[in-house]
Amino acid sequence: MSTSEIDATVRAELNRLRESIDNIDAAVVHMLAERFKATQQVGRLKADHKLPPADPARETRQIARLRELAQSANLDPAFAEKLLNFIIAEVIRHHERIAEEAENGQARNA
């Protein structure tokens, strides 16, 4: 069955649902952007104080917390953990870059 053969009522409902999904996707992107702004600040603070880019204890706590939130929201906790692990890996990559830039900047000024 092609899209043109779908009943008009069904097509309208499908479009309504897809618009909702599009809005949620936009909100997710904006929330991730805000999260990364905050983690960039954490990365600069860590670099300024020569702290390691990763914090495994915090990551473990965050994963457990997110799994609980996912469970209460009827979202697969394993999926939520995979998503958070992906985000954490990107944050650590950013923190390593920030630390390297800070170190290189200090070396140039020394």
Image (tube, helix red, strand yellow):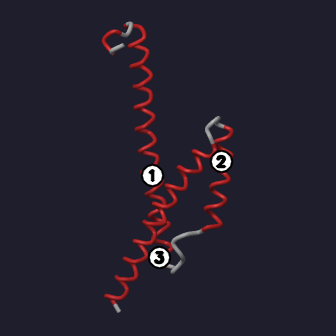
**Lower position in the chain sequence, tag 2 or tag 3:** 3
Q: Are marks 2 and 3 in contact (CB under 8 Å)?
A: no
Left or right, 12 with respect to 49, comes to left
- Res 74 → quadrant: top right
Question: Residues at badges 1 and 3 in contact (C-beta under 8 Å)?
Answer: no
Q: Residue at x 48, y 59 (%)?
A: 38
**Mark toward the viewer: 2 or 3:** 2
Amino acid residing under circle 1: Glu
Which residue is under mark 1? 34
Residue holding disc 3: 47
Percent position of residue 76, x then y = 62, 40
- Of the numbered discs 1 and 2, the one sitting upstream in the chain is 1
Mark 3 secondary-structure assignment: helix
Residue occupying the point 44% across, 30% down: 21
**Quadrant placement of the C terminus:** bottom left
For this orientation, the residue located farthest to the bottom is 110
Amino acid type indicated by mark 2: Arg
| Kind of element beneath mark 2 | helix
- Judging depth in this view, the residue of 19 and 84 nearest the camera is 84
The crowd level at tag 3 (other Cα within 10 Å; few <14, some 14-19, many 20+) is many
Q: Nearer the viewer, residue 8 or 94?
A: 8
Q: Name the residue under label 2.
A: 67
Q: Position of residue 40 (x, y in %)?
A: 44, 63
Mark 1 vs mark 2: give the one in front: 2
Looking at the image, tell me whether mark 1 or mark 3 is earlier in sequence order.
1
Look at the picture and state if 75 lies above or below 101.
above
